[in-house]
Image: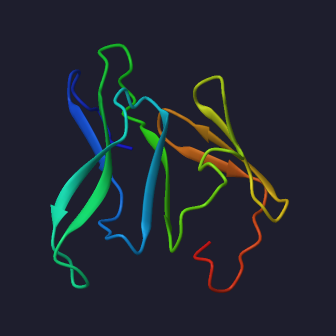
Amino acid sequence: MSSGPRPDSAVRQSGWATDSHLVSELHPLHCFDGEVTSVASGSTAYTERSWMPVVTGTVDAGEGDGVFVCLARLSGEATAQPLDADVLVMCGARIRIAWPEGDVQHVVLGKDNVTVTGTATTEAGTGR
């Protein structure tokens, strides 16, 4: 979220730079207008060649809130479950997330804040 972005400002979100051993994914949810692309990102501490997903957008003149949202996932293997399978975007700025463990959270994107309700179980080693 940014405060007072100028109309026509470019927005760019990138995922993790990975090689063929890891999978980095992005899925735009709110205000991004571009498709997810994959760009070469050079070397990392683990590999000489890597790629990362990138999604772009532009702040619309009427939008003004500067809230852009995307899902991001880094995993050790490609999964059959699509990244957005358990996420429902409602009315543009309301997001419902159903975690695989069964917990449900609701996210409301306001002009000046983000509100999260519901609880998610934090499991050791999962990064959540």
Is residue 27 found left or right of 128 in the rendered image?
left
Q: As drawn, which residue projects farthest toward the top?
A: 62
Q: Position of residue 92 (x, y in %)?
A: 58, 25
Write the residue at 20% across / 77% down: 44
Viewer-nearest residue: 16 or 3? 16
Viewer-nearest residue: 62 or 100? 100
Q: Is residue 31 above or below residue 96?
A: above
Q: Quadrant of the N terminus?
A: top left
Write the residue at 77% across / 61% down: 100
Viewer-nearest residue: 128 or 79? 79
Q: Position of residue 50 (x, y in %)?
A: 24, 67
Viewer-nearest residue: 92 or 4? 92
Q: Is residue 56 above or below residue 45?
A: above
Q: Position of residue 77 (x, y in %)?
A: 53, 70
Write the residue at 19% across / 70% down: 49
Quadrant assignment, res 109:
top right
Q: As drawn, which residue projects farthest toward the right?
A: 102
Image mark count: 0
Q: Is residue 29 above or below residue 115?
A: above
